[in-house]
Amino acid sequence: MGADMTAQPSTPVPRPASPEPTAPDPVSSTVSSAAPSSAPSAAPAGEAASTGGAATGPVSTSPVTAVVAPDGHDGAPAPRWARFGSPPRRPLLLGLGASLLMLVGGFGAGGVLVRDPWLTNSPIGFWRYGHGSELATALVYIGVALLAWAWVQLGREVIAGRVGGRAVLTTAAVWLVPMLVTPPLFTRDVFSYLAQGALPLHGFDPYAVGPEVMPGVFTDNVHYFWQDTPAPYGPLFILLAKGTAAAVGGNVIAGVILMRLVLCIGLVLLVWALPELTRRMGGRIPVALWVAVANPVMIVHMVGGGHNDLLVMGLLAVGALYALRGRPVIAIVLVTAAMAVKASAAVALPFVVLVWAAQMSGPSRTVRILKATAAGVGVFAVTFALITVAAQVNLGWLPALSAPSMIVNWLSLPTGAGELVHWVLNLVFNLPKQPFINVARIVGGLLLLWIGVKQWLAARDGGPDALRRAGIVLLAVAVLSPATLPWYLSWGIALLAMTAWTPKALSWLVFVSLWLVIVYYPNGEAALYNWGYLAGCALVCGLAAWSLLHPDPLRLRRRKDPAAGTSTTSADDALTAAGAGQRQG
């Protein structure tokens, strides 16, 4: 999967003809500035107004080099909106409406509180039960569908080079704001975070006991699966969770919001590092922002769900940037901090060491790698020890890392393979399932080890390629580990978003991203074995993926040519032809 998602033999998404501006705008636009007042009133062929809407005339296959004035009127002064990149209004408003629908629906269909102090005894308490809950669920799904539509529309603009990085970032920010205050969507993990943070405040070791030993409002809302499970997270996250729980007391609603804000530090770090990291790794800033920040996985799962993987993404991205800047000590400190949130981030450390080794002087590559490894181990040990001491915990979280393996679902490819083999044989023999899963997970572990070693050996020259390969291995960890959850794939995207992408790879990204959003129900329960539901989801995701490069895939918008009296396709189809011409050129 990782190999397909980065541009290898295929032609990457074309860059606009004009170079991307640099400072003072860190998220630089990839299109030229607005046309001067002397420009003709009609935009050149193939250029749509940056304020949104499809082109209305023939579209040139040449790269976009100019756009009309940000307000859509040549010669008019640039409005304040231009300061935000003049994002296309249609996807921006569509996505905002989607987020608001999910916000409203989330109060009845999301990870709602067991005893909601606002809704339970209010006139709108019906929203949580019966027909009210069904209506709330419908609103959430409508919101997801509209968000997917908005994201695909924005993606077309990005691929065509009509919007820059600032426009994509503005659009994503508008979509994200409602998610900061929504009830947890498609998960209940944030309640576990708060309970695990409260455990040490009450004298319990979060690595030895589960939330059930501490009755209270946090524990009441933890999913039953995790009630007796010790925390599988690193000391840095326990420190942050403890601080959050202490700050809100017993106010679980404030706790959910504050925990989101704490985790959004990772989003800020990711956005800060992304422009320079993208330039160094050969990608396009608008594409990277569309892949990593405007992605529905980010909007719905990472922020709406409130997952600590968001913090891991930010620390990995900044660590990768400092590695390429020639600041390896800071890079290892940051990646170690990411590991102190989730252990999976440790996979990136050997690749950061290779980047460091390539920057050293020495008689041979082997000697440089050995020197960098020794120094890296020292930096890692000191950093991790300081974080552990600051969190006032021990190393008990290492045995607790096996806790997620209790999750059995086929998103983990080895687990799915074991289940499939068992299902086939069980048609004839009455056999227990677990041995098949255990064997498949062992095979998956060996395959993961082989992939990791192969990528590491191929990355010995260091540089951006080493970090790209680290992203591939992080993706492999996500899908080949004993347990996989939809947001785990964000680990690899934190590094792969900044590389060069082909249009076809972006189309696959749309399918996978939307699939990962809807394979769980809004209340956090898995939908992975509801085969009819999954079949419908696959069709919808496939349609969205196809429509990224083929606007109007169902051919619903055909119009009559008034001159010839024949049916012609819409302007969006001309845009598709233009994109194909750019890719072939």
Image: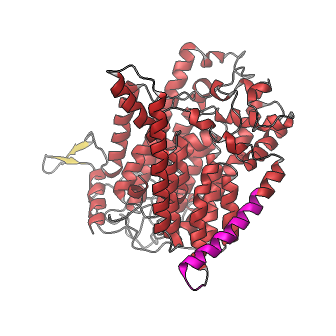
Residue 570 percent coordinates (x, y): 27, 48
Q: Nearer the viewer, residue 101 or 335?
A: 335
Residue at point 26%, 64% (across, down): 581
Quadrant for residue 488, please give it: top right
Residue 44 percent coordinates (x, y): 34, 66
Asked if 475 appears above or below 106 in the picture, the reply is below
| Lateral position of residue 235 relative to residue 66, left or right | right
Q: Nearer the viewer, residue 204 or 281?
A: 204
* Residue 270 magenta-highlighted: no
* Residue 380 magenta-highlighted: yes
Quadrant for residue 101, please give it: top right
Q: Nearer the viewer, residue 241 or 186?
A: 241
| Lateral position of residue 110 relative to residue 465, left or right | right
Q: Nearer the viewer, residue 377 or 39?
A: 377
Residue 302 percent coordinates (x, y): 59, 44
Asked if 471 appears above or below 396 in the picture, the reply is below
User: What colour scheme does the image use?
Assistant: secondary structure
Quadrant for residue 72, please give it: bottom left
Total numbered badges shown on the rendered structure: 0
Magenta region, main secondary structure: helix
Range of residues picked out in magenta: 362-384
Residue at point 81%, 45% (across, down): 393
Asked if 64 appears above or below 438 in the picture, the reply is below
Residue at point 38%, 32% (across, down): 420
Q: Quadrant of the C terminus?
A: bottom left
